[in-house]
Amino acid sequence: MATTPGRLRHPGVRDALAAVITLTALVLASCGLPSQAASASTILSIHTGDSSSAVLVLTPPAGTVRLEIRRDGRPIDAFPVKDRESIAYTDHLLWPSTGFAYEVRGYDQAGKLIDTQRMTVKTPAQQGSFPRLYAATSFWNQPIAQNAGVDKSSTAMVAKAIAPYSVAANFVAGSNAWGKPLAYASAGSPFAIGCTRYDCQTPVSFRIPQYARASTGSDHHLVVIDQSANSELDMWLAAQDASTNFWSAGDRYVTDPGGWGAICARGKRCGAAVASGFAAFGGVVRPEEIAQGHIDHALFFTTPYTRQGYIACPATHTDGRNDDPAAIPMGARIQLDPAFKVDEQPWPKWQKVLARALQVYGAYVGDTGQSLSFSAESTLDRGYDAWALAGVPALGSLADLPWTQLRILQLQPC
């Protein structure tokens, strides 16, 4: 199936499957089922959707009302099923060229285990560039024009809002506290998402998989994508009641993961899960992008010294703190001087990949932070350390970057 430019790869059946395994599983001898039911077990097949997903297609045996899926022993999801109804479940966030072991458990109305299936699948190697979020025309995905203007206050803003914080500058890869977790919705019923602080007047219902966890830092961010509905759920202060599985958030917004990359249109004003009004996963670096050697979108960064009362396009909101024209506003775009010779630096690969992205796509100020940092995916919801596989240390220092050779592109009030 062809991939639409600017959108996610669809996890459905593709013409070239890397692996197809069809199994007739063994029924547990101790289940104590009636003889008619005991003769049937889940009919199950699995194939890779692409290098980062696997599709489980299954028909549960008679009497099954609930299925649980585990990957490498870790619970992935659990959801109700109808009697003998076939379903397809897509598991995302897999690593290319890697084997994964699955277990599917079926339960009856009384909660008794009646069927167990186990299988393995190996993902193929990544083909082409890792897919990016948001439309090809999104501001996140537009390279900086060669003739882009530099703001008249660029030198002052770099000196006041960036350079003083460069010694502690970091890339939040590997951090469950400050990275942004990403989960993918699949089969199952939608959850009603409660609201505790902002924009609570709009009801939100969204499927959230069992494995989903929010970041552990003070923001408690969580992003969930439902590809079947072309929807992205962004949450700030996300929390789950473990006894009821009920989710709530300080605020929660639904946007299009194939859209322009912010919660409301350019020039409008609206809240969001991040202070700038951007979609919460905009500019977030993923481990596959470092592994492939290039990032094909702008980055998201924070600094402590943000400007109060000024919103620069494409931002639609601000939490700027400082009444100072040398403070940098939400939505400002920075760029590393393209003439700087990144490849000649004695840096590890991951730093060079970030630096090149700063030259080609730049980075947008998206939030006020306690440090100068660039956003990355938390692998909290993957169940394995993808950043280690990509060769990136946890909270890697960016102090070596040539911060004085950054520039602020022409600001446009929004």
Image: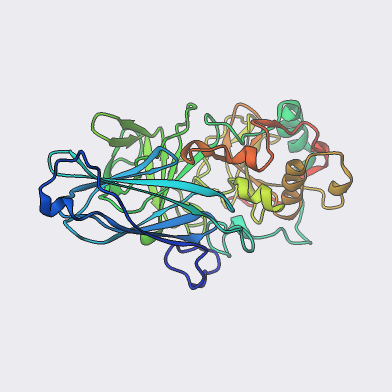
In the picture provided, is 80 more to the left or to the right than 134? left
| Residue 280 in the image, given as x and y percentages of width and height | 49, 45
Q: Nearer the viewer, residue 286 or 339?
A: 286
In the picture provided, is 26 more to the left or to the right than 298? left
In the picture provided, is 61 more to the left or to the right than 9? left
| Residue 312 in the image, given as x and y percentages of width and height | 60, 48
Residue at 51%, 63% in the rendered image: 7
Position of 212 relative to 412 (above/below): above
Q: Nearer the viewer, residue 413 or 392?
A: 392
- The image quarter containing residue 58 is bottom left
| Residue 294 in the image, given as x and y percentages of width and height | 70, 53
Q: Nearer the viewer, residue 383 or 348?
A: 383
| Residue 310 in the image, given as x and y percentages of width and height | 58, 41
In the picture provided, is 172 more to the left or to the right than 2? right
Q: How is the image coloured?
A: rainbow
Position of 372 relative to 297 (above/below): above
